[in-house]
Image: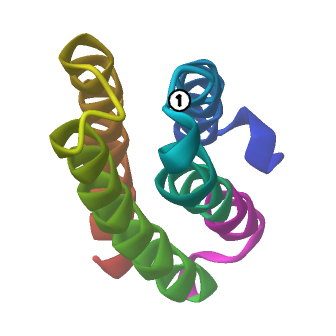
Amino acid sequence: MDPFDIPLFQNVYDFYKTLYLCLKDFPRQDRYSLGQRCEVLTIELLQSIAIAGRLLKLQKAPYLEKASTTVDLLRVALRLAKDVHALDMKKYVTLQAAVDAIGRMLGGWRRSVLA
């Protein structure tokens, strides 16, 4: 199976494209710290999902756990960006809704692997 065909991978890919556009509006002081951290976490999430998509069911669990932790860290980073006003509320709501959907999909995949 091609990991790039996994719906979860596509959702994270689309999230990254949206985040990338939002990062252009981050204040300079936050763009290269908090903004860059959000970007790095998203790329790490893409990597974990791509790797898990290529493995056998029994081998997927560690990568899905790493992806789950990365989603949690991404949620915190986005909330912090909103709280320090690096990210406006409208963009935060859009990004947070996407992260929530990604988290739900990832949780379902994790449950199916651990079952």
| Residue bearing the label numbered 1 | 15
88 over 6 or under it: above or below: above
Image quadrant containing the C terminus: bottom left
Q: Is residue 78 left or right of residue 33?
A: left
- The scheme the figure's colours follow is rainbow
Indicate yes or no whether the magenta region holds residue 89.
Answer: no
The residue located at (64%, 28%) in the rendering is: 20
Residue 87: x %, y % from top left = 33, 29
Residue 35: x %, y % from top left = 53, 47
Q: Residues within 10 Å of mark 1 (few under 14, many from 20)?
A: some
15 over 73 or under it: above or below: above
Q: Which residues are magenta?
A: 46-58
Residue 10: x %, y % from top left = 63, 30
Q: Nearer the viewer, residue 69 or 30?
A: 30
114 over 36 or under it: above or below: below
The residue located at (19%, 19%) in the rendering is: 89
Q: Is residue 83 left or right of residue 31?
A: left
